[in-house]
Image (cartoon, coloured by chain):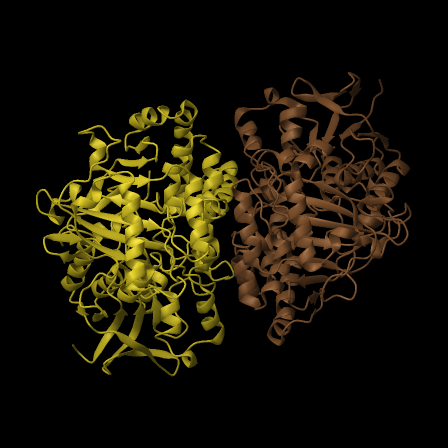
Chain colours: A brown, B yellow
Amino acid sequence: MSNYDIVIIGAGHNGLACAAYLAKAGRKVLVLEANDEVGGLAATREFAPGFRASVAQTLPQLNRGLVDDLNLEKHGFKLALDAMPTVAMAPGKSPISITSGALSGANAEDSAAYPEYRRLLNKFADAINPFWHKRPPMIADGDMGDLATLGKFGWNLRRLGKDDMRELMRMIALPAQDLMDEFFQDDALKAALSWDCNIGSKLAPRSPNNAVLALLLRMSGDLTDGLPLPAGGAGGFTDALAASATSFGAEIRCGAAVEKVLIDDMSVSGVQLSNGEQVQATTVISNADPKTSFLTLLGAQHLDVQFTHRISRLRNQGYVAKLHLALDEIPKFTGLEKPAGRLMLTPSMKYIECAFDDAKYGGYANELPMEVIIPSLVDDSLAPVGKHVLSANIQYAPYAVKGGWDQHREQFLANALATLSQYSPGIESQVSAAELLTPADLEQQFNLAGGHWHHAEFAIDTWWMNRPTYGASQYTTPISGFHLCGAGAHPGGGLMGTCGANAARAILEDR
Amino acid sequence: MKSKYDAIVIGAGHNGLTNAAYLAKSGLDVLVVEKNDYIGGAAVSRELHEGWLYSNCSYVCSLLRQSIHRDLNLTRHGLMIVPYSGTTNFSLNGNYIAEYGDHDMQYREIKRHSLRDADAIHRYETDLMRYAKLIRHFLLRTPADPTSFKPRDLGEMMFMAKKFAGMGEEQVYEFMRFMTMSAGDFLDEYFENDLVKALYSTSSIIGTALGVYSPGTAYVLLHHVMGDVDGAVGAWGLARGGMGAISNALAGALKEHDGAILTEAPVAQIIVKNGCARGVALEDGREINADIVVSNLDPKRTFTNIMDAADIPSDLRKKAENFKIRGSSGKVNIALTGKPDFPSLPADHKLRNGSFQFLDSMERMERAYDDWKHGRWSDDPFIEMTQSSVWDPTLASPGHYFVSCFIQYCPAEVEGGWTPDKRDAFGKTVIDQICNYSPNFRDHIAHMEVRTPFEIENEIGLTEGNIFQGELTIDQLMFNRPFPGYSQYRGPVKGMYMCGSGTHPGGGVSSACGANSAREILMDLKRPNVVPEDDVDE
């Protein structure tokens, strides 16, 4: 039995970022990871001999500040690609390529509308950006830092100017469909642009209130001007985080599942592992999702009824499946010379909405909206020479599929392959292995209750001072010494380490 | 009719009449022009079949501001609101759940279905009532422009901040959460039983082109409980003599203050000269002058139909085009020669006198929404049936009944367009649905009127037949209603105003839009305010 200042439960990217910041500040930190490798959903794992992939895959939200603070480049972090274009695909139509600067292959009206769309969103993103990296404010206790945050928020809104501030306050509530309809005409283009509004959530193009906020979160990174792809898969990023944390003196133990958080008189006293071993610490930070953190690790008996109710009501059922295919050669996609970029197999927003309709009732569509990347095109560490990895996010795969995933896995995979072959005829014959990770698999393999990307739905009603919920939104909890640092905390999911970094800062300021 | 008035109000709906009544009360010479040969717009009583009086559009009343009711002496002008209670929600298997006004009875009723849910009902009602009482402070006020530094806007923001702060930080955050979430998620937090959730979910999508699980519908639910009857918040009532009694009483108040109404006078255009409103041109070529022109039409019609594109800023036209008015509701009004029989309810049960809904679960509602999304009416529509004549015997002779059925969802456009045949097929779907619960219902029908959004739009002039003159989503509420920068009832040219449900606080027979608009007009004219403040809840 040993003593640490701080124990962090879970070595996902947020747990590791949190550990690195705290260790850098001189704290004695132990990270406990239940799995045999670090990274969680961001670990690059071998799914077939020689083929590697990760659940998370791109880094739109990563910030230069974190990379520099933690010397990640020194620890091996690099990009395989600075800016990946997004390609809007529809059967029988020529693809439209989307970068942060311009469209190519779109009609004249859409090409002309795009700069204004980007200008507005960039402006909104810039106004909001500082607040992803700050502790959400709570006003009642009159904390000066919190009041300053709120004041700055109001000031940043006002600085947008009358017209744009008004547009922000209106557009923030628009469904993706209305937002896109106001700017664009082409169905495939609108669908591709709407993807980031809803991916990971139980939302579809017609769902109000959350589209723009999700877009702004996706735009919160500043590493490059486009969509960066890490070298070595997402694991390349988390391995660097782990190396950084270790270099600052943090200790990481894999294969060490925490069974419960030990409480002594409403304060944390340590954790107990599944093998019965106890580790003493007065600060325990959970990178697990809020439901697991409070209801499983801590136990509702230590919490008041109202708070427990708030945690129980969190919506944490995932709706995205991840597909990894081992391919014998580069697949040929109709209309594309080379399948480079992020291929959006989403002919229209209606197509996405229809897939959502099936998922709402516990089913899934025959034709599945997919976001496809072939990272091995630019990263030869992921597949044997000449072979390739296809990695796809698929909507919608309801966590609670009727009858359970065991009975639907094959059918879902068949639907996904059938959808793919509409765009890449004959791709089935190139597939030598496939891995399908449904939300139920994510739950089981990564101890993530509900298998939700964001740990808890990312939406305006669970945002900022309401994330994950009132009483736990400042990385503190009703239990003294127990903290959150996962995607369930502000600002939410996405491969960036910001939740962990924010939590570390909040904990350090607290002392 | 004179050739010049101080003010002209376009549209004799309840908000137009309220607006005109207050302008007249302040001493202005006011004319209301109405395209139909009757007044009231969507708040009307019409004898569509001899012997039966139909409230054929709006059919129940709760949002009507009590302070306006009193201030304009509407009771003396013949208005009486009769509270009613007892909604029964049936499920297909013969089960039912009722909504009672009485808390203890409600507890016992829900306990029949779920003890856990019965225990949650107090918490649910308390939370909802807290939000209702907060929002009621803002109904008879003009929304602040949050981008403005004018003292008045800052003052209004302070007022709002104080009301919020009064709830305490925890409740502020709970409220912010509530305002953006879906009714389905909200109800799931309290209840487990499908029938209980179905009962409470229906208010969240009435008139709304969203499903119970669409974010933002929790607010729509609140919109339907923030009204009151004689101060009983959340209660609903019927206007004795049908909803037209409200319009008639408002017209009475208008006439008392020497205002005039001109019917069968559709407006072709608002006349604008040198950037100022100068009057209206009627479709028959007549022109009437006034320095104040108020449109009670929805924002889309106002800015794309009766205003010349050259008279308004181009971005405003774009805003009007983007404004969401989505037809999602239908109505079937039925004259009956006998009282409908619902075998699931015990004979002589008092609930037989209440209103009825037919919904097992929120999933059924969501599926009906899915049909609407794809441009068709559902084979399994949601129906709210109000037995108006049971509570108001003036609507039908003894032994005869009038029932008003509100149907969600009905698309504004169907493939190939609406035709009389399709309309009748829609009506048949509704009657078939009712007959699933009341097998001999069809035998009692003496006459029925089927209205899809197409009929409502063509007759009443509501775009897509939307009962709220625009969706009640956050992007179109408060300072966003109807559009950012135009939420204080003023139009783009001097002397032009809006007073319809497309403005704050939105749809429902509230008179608040018309009253708020009148207050702004009087302020611009530097006349003393005659519009009352809202009642303040204790």
Q: Is residue B34 above or below residue A489?
A: below
What residue is rendered at 55% in x and 55% in y?
A: A205
- From where the camera sits, is residue B234 visible? no
Percent from the top left, x then y, of residue A475? Answer: 67, 36
Q: Is residue A192 above or below residue A483?
A: below
Name the side, left or right, on which B382 lies relative to B442.
right
Nearest the camera: A377 or B14? A377
Place residue A318 in its image quadrant.
top right
Q: Foreground residue, A118 or B444?
A: B444
Q: Is residue A173 left or right of residue A129?
A: left
Write the residue at 76% across / 20% down: A274
Q: Position of residue A343 (x, y in %)?
A: 71, 58
Residue B108 makes an appearance in the image:
yes
Image x and y of residue B510, in percent: 29, 53
Foreground residue, B44 or A25? B44
Q: Residue furthest left?
A: B398
Q: Quadrant of residue A465?
A: top right
Count of number-bearing discs: 0
